[in-house]
Image (cartoon, coloured by chain):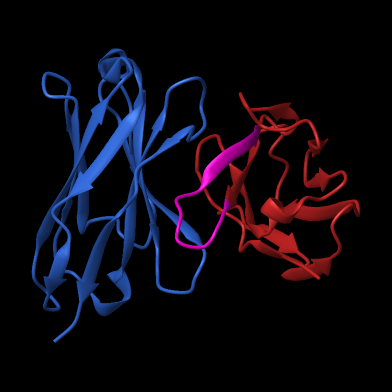
Amino acid sequence: NIVMTQSPKSMSISVGDRVTMNCKASQNVGNNIAWYQQKPGQSPKLLIYYASNRYTGVPDRFTGGGYGTDFTLTINSVQAEDAAFYYCQRIYNSWTFGGGTKLELK
Amino acid sequence: AVQLVESGGGLVQPKESLKISCAASGFTFSNAAMYWVRQAPGKGLEWVARIRTKPNNYATYYADSVKGRFTISRDDSKSMVYLQMDNLKTEDTAMYYCTASIAATVMDAWGQGASVTVSS
């Protein structure tokens, strides 16, 4: 079974900063990765699919990248409303989630 | 607007059964693969089950942690998806989210969740 490992587990940054979080697959998954954002008390929301495609309505400060086993989610000029948990997920043949990265604002 | 509304959650004892439901609206339900994803209190997301569409023979897939105990099903005539949970364990305690793949093979729509607590 493929394992998805996210790093770091948490990060604290300032509004306006640029942040990059990582997702590593234990086997080659091609571009079959999605990223979700979950704010406290809310359901997750899709941000990125097939590694780099921004979902409808997602601000362009969110960018996904990577292929194979190593993937990134970058947020340019972080806003206060971006404080949340972020999860990567394999999206083909199994739908395993990573453990999540908590983004906090200073 | 797309809506997924879960129902049927509650408190059950270990080894008991529970069936939760999800009512879908705002999209062509019969064309969408449907999923259940759960989240234990204070923990991350865990995919539970998937059911494909009629052209794909309603194929089902399960996480190893629930295989043999949980059954996902759907009723396209009612735009409903279900999760039958048997032989429940305390570690099944979680918020259970109904999700749909509407645009592509991703969970692009989510419900608000149904809370399931397994405790004696």
Q: Residue at x 63, y 61 (%)?
A: A100
Farthest-out residue, right: A17
Percent x, y for residue B113? 31, 52
Q: Is residue B118 above or below residue A76?
A: below
Please tell me which residue is depicted at 89% across the width and 52% down the height of the picture. A16
Say which quarter of the image contains residue B21: top left
Is A10 left or right of B19, judged from the image as shown? Answer: right
Note whether residue A26 is visible: no
Q: Residue furthest bottom?
A: B120
Instruction: Indicate the quadrant containing the N terminus of chain A: top left, top right, bottom left or bottom right.
Output: bottom right
x 79%, y 54%: residue:
A22
Residue situated in front as seen by the camera: B37 or A25: B37
The percent position of residue B94, horizontal first and vertical second, equals: 33, 67
- Left or right of residue A104, residue B65 in this image: left
The tint of chain A in the picture is red
Of B92 and A87, nearer the camera is A87
Q: Is residue B70 above or below residue B59?
A: below
Residue range (magenta)? A38-48
User: Image check: A97 left or right of B115?
Assistant: right
Q: Is residue B53 visible?
A: yes
User: Is A64 within the magenta?
Assistant: no
Residue A41 lies in the magenta-colored region: yes
| Location of residue A64 in the rendering, given as x and y in whole percent from the top left corner | 78, 37
Q: Quadrant of residue B8 in the image?
A: bottom left
> Residue B52's x, y, as percent?
33, 27
For residue B77, side relative to residue B22 (left or right): left
Q: B97 or A56: nearer the eye?
A: A56
Q: Count of labels shown?
A: 0
Q: Quadrant location of the C terminus of chain A?
A: bottom right
On screen, B79 above or below A103? above
The chain assigned the colour blue in the figure is B
